[in-house]
Image (tube, helix red, strand yellow):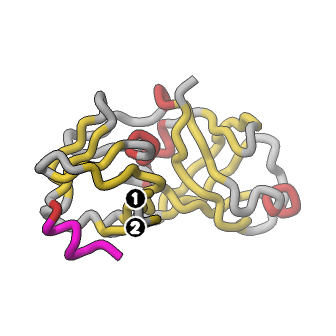
Amino acid sequence: MDILTVATILKPQGIRGELKVKVYLDDAEDLKSIPEVYIGGEQYALMHVRAAGEFAYITLRGIADRNAAELLRGKEVEALREDCPPLPEGRYYIGDLEGCKVIAANGEEIGSVISVTPAHTDIFTLQTPKGEVSFAAAEGVILDVDLQNKVITLDKKRYKEVSV
């Protein structure tokens, strides 16, 4: 089973079990195409989705009140890859990028991707020989993403300009 994280639960919304979530898909409307989600290993039917920018308000079967919704605060919302919408060329699911080896254009190994934080310009965190390093995926930093071989190629000069 190939599972992707599609959102994180921020808080309950109202008294009827609705949840406010931060969506990690390109468009919060894309949640509407997903029939069921997994939270903490439990499966839930996705009953209703209201998209609101990068957030959405969702209703799950079996979560009928605020108390039940409160127990899910802070948890990740996962879905089967086959239920998620296909991505356009040059876009990737975060789960596919995590674990990729990162190299410079000259072949020098820089590290490996620990995590990617979605933002206007995504923030990559790498494990390098010198410890953890973060960088913004600003224009010109990432030259190539080869998911088949799990390798991301960077422009080393641009990487050094934006890394911390």
* Image spot of residue 57 (x, y percent): 60, 59
Helix, strand or loop: magenta stretch: helix
Type of the residue with mark 2: Val
In the rendered structure, the answer to whether residue 151 lies left or right of residue 23 reads: left
Can residue 161 be seen from the camera position used here?
yes
Task: Say whether disc 2 or disc 1 marks the residue closer to the N-terminus.
Answer: 1
Tell me what residue is drawn at x 80 percent, y 49 percent: 63
In the rendered structure, the answer to whether residue 138 lies left or right of residue 86 reads left
Task: Tell me if residue 128 comes above or below residue 101 in the rendering.
Answer: below
- For label 1, the residue is 128
The residue to which callout 2 is attached is 133
Q: Residues within 10 Å of mark 2 (few under 14, many from 20)?
A: some
Q: Secondary structure at mark 1?
A: strand
Amino acid type of the residue tagged 1 in the rendering: Thr
Magenta span: 157-164
| Residue 151 left/right relative to 123 | left
Q: Are marks 2 and 1 in contact (CB under 8 Å)?
A: yes
